Image: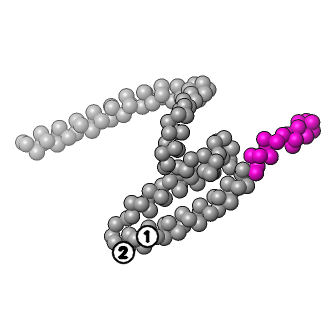
Amino acid sequence: MSDDIVENLKEPSQWKRIAFMIALAVALYVATIVLTLLTVAQALFSLLTGENNENLRDLGRDLATYVHQIWSFLTYNSEMKPFPFSPYPGSEEEAAAQAAEPVAAPEPEPAPAAKKRAPRKAAAKDKPAAKSKPAAKKAAPKKDDESAEGE
């Protein structure tokens, strides 16, 4: 086991990723400050004009996408390095890159979960039948009340 750790420590790709992660953590910090300023500017613009600023809204959307990409990379959920190592979100280059990427199909649910659900469905079928009988009983007194009122 200690040999595996030594081999992992000697792997240059691991150290490169850590260097990228440090650089992107700094970019994330700057992006958070910019998003905060953008939020305040949008609120002031909205108060003064009564409408939101479409340009600020678009910038906020792209910046939020950028922050999401950084977090995905930092948490090892994505191997794609965000801007400046790839196109900025919302750019024409980024749209073309996303169109070229294959869309992953969602993973099917595990079989044991389906087996657990089967008994619940069978029990649910019995309950509506039991509920329909009291509904019929409730309907009968209403008819009696209507006929008593009519006499």
Tell whether position 57 is magenta.
no
Q: Main secondary structure of the magenta part?
A: helix
Q: Secondary structure at mark 2?
A: helix
- Image quarter of residue 2: top right
The residue lying at 53 percent from left, 69 percent from top is 37
- Image quarter of residue 138: top left
The residue lying at 30 percent from left, 36 percent from top is 135
- The reply to whether callout 2 and callout 1 are in contact (CB within 8 Å) is no
Amino acid beneath label 1 = Ala
Q: Could one spot residue 143 in this view of the protein?
A: yes
Rendered view: 3 above or below 29: above
Q: Could one spot residue 5 in this view of the protein?
A: no
Figure label count: 2
Rendered view: 18 above or below 122: below
Rendered view: 133 above or below 65: above
Left or right of 51 in this view: 71: right
Find residue 3 and report its horizontal and vertical position in percent: 92, 36
Left or right of 111 in this view: 42: left
> Which corner quadrant holds the N terminus?
top right
- Distance from Cα at disc 2 to Cα at disc 1: 9 Å
Viewer-proximal residue, 5 or 150?
5
Viewer-proximal residue, 18 or 105?
18
Amino acid beneath label 2 = Leu
Residue pushed farthest bottom?
48
Which label was assigned to residue 43?
1
Residue pushed farthest front?
93
Write the start and end of the magenta stretch as one range. Answer: 1-19
* Residue that carries the numbered disc 2 in the rendered image: 48
Find residue 70 and report its horizontal and vertical position in percent: 63, 51
